[in-house]
């Protein structure tokens, strides 16, 4: 008999209920309306002219090409029958940002079910009260992300950052659905989206080690095989990008340490489980799905051969393709190589994120951690997975970028930390759920409805 995957904890209902659908729809719709009312009517002074022209003709955008975003924006140019191309592409940016906010609200709503099942005193709440608490908390978390500083600005123009945030949010949501249901196809789809994400934001190479660690935390056997198959493949295929772990210049020590640690944990899992390869089919499926998504880079030489108006680096040739993918015309990243520099980068990241996202939300985001010991194992694993994910798009990414401390450089890299606001928004929503539920249970029990 084939070995079954680990699934020791009872799971909540895998079906999305009506409250989940309402919070997703309302958050997405209201955020999108807010974006449309403030949308930039034409081109702005940044990259929007080049990006819009590239999307209009399906061309090869600025390094590293952004093929997924180009196809996505091309669809908005073709499907919207009115206004100028820059406005249509901006609508695509707004739509991606709104969907990301809706997914954050949906995940907060699903997390609310986990919290309600973990703490027995919340059993006094009626179904209606639970749904209202989940819905309002999810909505607040979604709009906290959508209307945070800089993110709101870039959701109004022709740019690719909101699309990056959308892809990353989808990955977290799919991992959550896998945790809830145990169905591996959610992991397969998550790795496909991760491959697309790397074509749009190469610095998200920092995410894979902690995604593997999160999967290892939830399902030890599956994470063990996945890490030892996927990690070497991803390191190999991304060696042509700007964020290779090693190249002719030096070793990227932050990335090397992250990938080495994830590999060692997978080896330790082999020792603990006294087995290897029992889940190789699912692990291989995830790896192939990643390669399928990452293969969208092959769109660039095909588009370049058509000679569109925007055709960076002439990627129809192999040297041009490598130059484009590796962002050869830009300065090579210089990762931090000592703890004092990493500490300085981390402090600047905290100050920047707090100022942009909002310090008040940090108070609510801290509340779930004070209740950590009262949560059931499944909810604690979800919290730990979010913590690992925040590490990869926070401290590890800050060490990788190692930006100068001047104001201009810090302003440029703040966009790279947009994904960090996703776990912060999720914790904020969970904190609001705990606070509201606690206040609702202080009074006498509600009558059944």
Image: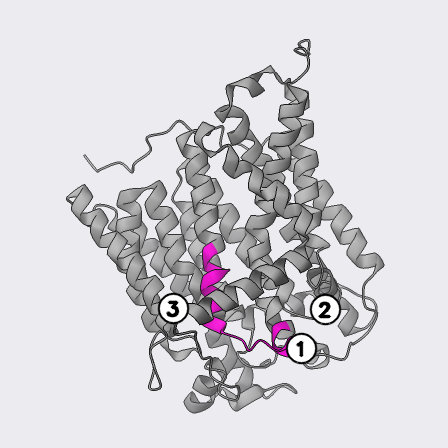
* Label 2 close to label 1 by CB (< 8 Å): yes
Picture mark count: 3
Which badge, 3 or 2, comes first in the chain's sequence? 2
Tell me which residue sits at (75%, 53%) in the image: 32
Residue topped by disc 2? 89
Tell me which residue sits at (70%, 42%) in the image: 140
Name the quadrant of the C terminus. Answer: top right
Residue topped by disc 1? 51
Question: Which stretch appears magenta?
Answer: 391-410
x%, y% of residue 293? 45, 64
- Give the structural element (helix, strand or loop) at label 1: helix
Question: In the image, is residue 151 above or below residue 64?
Answer: above
Which badge, 3 or 1, comes first in the chain's sequence? 1
Question: In the image, is residue 281 above or below residue 314?
Answer: above
x%, y% of residue 94? 72, 60
- How many residues crowd around disc 3 within 10 Å: few (fewer than 14), some, or many (20 or more)? many
Residue 254: mark: 3
């Amino acid at each position: 008999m084939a070995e079954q995957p680990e699934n020791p904890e009872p799971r909540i209902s895998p079906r999305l209920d009506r409250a989940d659908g309402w919070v997703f729809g309302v958050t997405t719709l209201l955020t999108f309306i807010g974006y449309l009312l403030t949308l930039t009517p034409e081109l702005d002074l940044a990259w929007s002219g080049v990006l819009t022209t590239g999307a209009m003709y399906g061309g090869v955008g600025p390094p590293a090409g952004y093929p997924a975003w180009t196809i996505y924006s091309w669809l908005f140019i073709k499907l919207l029958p009115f206004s100028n191309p820059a406005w249509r592409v901006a609508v695509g940016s707004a739509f991606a940002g709104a969907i990301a906010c809706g997914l954050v609200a949906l995940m907060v709503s699903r997390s609310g079910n986990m919290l309600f099942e973990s703490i027995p005193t919340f059993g006094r709440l009626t179904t209606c009260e639970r749904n209202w608490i989940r819905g309002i908390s999810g909505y607040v978390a979604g709009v906290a992300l959508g209307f945070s500083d800089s993110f709101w600005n870039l959701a109004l123009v022709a740019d690719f950052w909101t699309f990056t945030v959308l892809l990353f949010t989808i990955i977290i949501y799919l991992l959550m659905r896998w945790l809830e249901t145990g169905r591996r196809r959610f992991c397969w789809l998550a790795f496909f989206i991760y491959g697309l994400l790397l074509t749009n934001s190469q610095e998200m190479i920092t995410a894979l080690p902690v995604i593997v660690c999160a999967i290892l935390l939830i399902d030890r056997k599956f994470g063990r095989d996945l890490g030892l198959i996927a990690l070497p493949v991803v390191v190999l295929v991304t060696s042509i990008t700007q964020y290779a772990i090693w190249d002719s210049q030096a070793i990227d020590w932050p990335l090397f340490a992250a990938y080495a640690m994830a590999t060692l944990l997978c080896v330790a899992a082999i020792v603990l489980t006294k087995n290897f390869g029992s889940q190789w089919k699912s692990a291989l499926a995830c790896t192939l799905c990643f390669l399928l998504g990452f293969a969208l880079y092959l769109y660039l030489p095909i588009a370049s051969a058509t000679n569109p108006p925007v055709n960076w680096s002439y990627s129809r040739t192999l040297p041009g393709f490598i130059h484009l993918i590796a962002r050869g015309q830009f300065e090579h990243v210089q990762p931090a190589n000592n703890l004092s520099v990493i500490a300085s980068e981390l402090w600047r990241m905290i100050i920047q994120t707090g100022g942009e996202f909002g310090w008040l939300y940090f108070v609510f985001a801290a509340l779930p951690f004070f209740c950590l010991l009262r949560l059931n194992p499944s909810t604690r694993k979800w919290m730990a997975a979010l913590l690992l994910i925040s590490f990869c798009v926070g401290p590890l990414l800050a060490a990788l970028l190692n930006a100068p401390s001047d104001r201009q450089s810090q302003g440029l890299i703040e966009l790279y930390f947009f994904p960090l606001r996703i776990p912060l928004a999720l914790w904020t929503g969970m904190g609001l759920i705990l606070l509201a539920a606690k206040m609702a249970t202080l009074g006498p029990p509600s009558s059944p409805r």
